[in-house]
Amino acid sequence: MPSPLHVAIPAAAHPYWRAALQRSGVPTASLDANTGPESTLFLPDAGDHDSPAQRQHVVRLHRAGAPVLAGTAWAQTLDMPTRLHWFGSADPGAVLAARTTPAPLAILDLPSAERLLRPAASLARRTGPGGLAVREVLADVDHGALRRRVERALCHLAHTAGRPFARFAHHPGAYRQTLAIRIDADGFRAAATAALRASLQRANLRSTWFVDVERHARGDGLAGLADLAADGHELQSHGFRHYTYRSRARNERNLRRSAAALAAFGVRATATAAPFGTWNPGFEQAVRALGWTWSSEFSRVHDDVPGPLGGTPDEPWQVPVHPICPALLFAAGAGVAEVHAWFLAELAACRERGEPAVFYGHPIDDLERCPDLLPELAVAARAAGPLWQPTLGELVAFHRERSTSTLTARSTATGIEIESSGPAALQVQMPDGSEQWVLGRGTAAALEPAAAPNAADSALLVPQPRRRVRADRAPLRTKKLQLARLWRELKR
Ligand SMILES: [Zn+2]
């Protein structure tokens, strides 16, 4: 059902894009004959299935006031007055062009979903407070950053048109922040496990442990899992042998063997994380074949919200973590104080974005070197407001339930009447910067009637063709500067 709070997306769009909006919590509707100009349109890609009739429909809706966010592929099929120049794809989500009349429109550099889903990872550099830099093997595409840019652009376009923008919150009910902890229990040393267990108790935090089964069995560590479960921690499989194979069959054998060993100690494994973070398609096929429902792979997606990355129904959900563990920071020469500063900064960044903070570490040679880190993070998080503190399994369950939320919204004289179902409040962001949270049924304040489009404010920003970067590069042109300003605004 179209409404002023839904984003309409063509049914033929690649499921990746719908899944991206779903991770953002943005209510979506199918773009069809019932879609009216009160909806914001998102046209991420083009295909043979996008008929000339649908393109005409889009042009009509846009002329009637519907804000449009298009990927390059769609934009090239629209009635654009100027040829677009490809601005390069090194930075997916960059704004290529924008205009404000007849309604706000922006064109983003959106690579094809097939390209975005290509399973490629490589060594990436991350920097934190004080310029501390570390390297980790991460997915080549920063899906979280791309999704946030699309979300920001949709919000910006709606606000430019004088309309509200809505998304379901990333936390259940009245919670305003979420902190979850993943423990990769590589190897086993009783003292390290005991120290981490004590640290978690002191922090009053629950966590999800991925157990390296073979080395726990060898070190007599499996019997201790019952104590961890009794503390409220979730236990899952990190494989029998701590190794990620290329083939589906070998991964499946390894995971099945781990599940059998864990079952003997009362642990029912239903999820996993690829050993060494070396996820590959064979690993995912094994997870799927076992009927396991989620996995946590930062060589696939990191610093993002749980969801099915490709958007297909039977695909295991991903639970992204912040991909830097304390051990990596120690190895880069950081001291304990710098490690604390890194994670406090990340926690603040997640809170700022309204997204869950999911951190990970290991018991041995890692969290045992900074036993006060988790307690300090917990204190900082709780000081900032009501904190939801789930296991990763509970986090996935919440986001699954949120993905089935329904919303009806209609504009009336008194405001937008909202009726929604689901575990999360609807965050309605008004063009004036105010925000309202509606859980279930409620009314968001009335809006001033949208101002008539200002003909003077119709600059179409067209970037110059990409040039090679040279030391003696000519000064940037005005239009390029305008574009950069808009881009910064959308990225913020
Ligand atoms: Zn591991």
Image: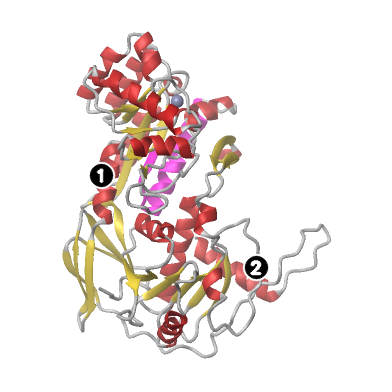
Q: Residue at x 42, y 48 (%)?
A: 304
Q: How far apart are marks 1 and 2 (CA)?
A: 40 Å
Q: Position of residue 81 (x, y in %)?
A: 60, 85
- Residue extending furthest left? 441
Tell me, for residue 477, which label it has, or none. Answer: none
Label 2 lies in ligand 1 vicinity (Cβ under 8 Å)? no
Whichever of labels 1 and 2 marks the residue nearer the N terminus, that label is 2
Kind of residue at disc 2: Trp
Q: Residues within 10 Å of mark 2 (few under 14, many from 20)?
A: few
Colour mode?
secondary structure
Quarter of the N terminus within the rendering: bottom left
Residue occupying the point 77% across, 68% down? 475
Q: Residue 368 is drawn in which quadrant?
A: top left
Q: What stretch is highlighted in magenta?
A: 336-358
Most common SS among magenta residues? helix
Left/right placement of residue 276 relative to residue 209 reads: right
For residue 298, say whether it is visible.
no
Q: Quadrant of ligand 1?
A: top left
Q: Is residue 218 magenta?
A: no
SS type, badge 2: loop
Residue where numbered disc 2 is placed: 86
Could you say which is closer to the camera, residue 435 or residue 20? 20
309 or 163: which is nearer to us? Answer: 309
What is the residue that sits farthest to the front in this orientation? 249
In the image, is residue 233 above or below residue 480? above
Q: Nearer the viewer, residue 293 or 161?
A: 293
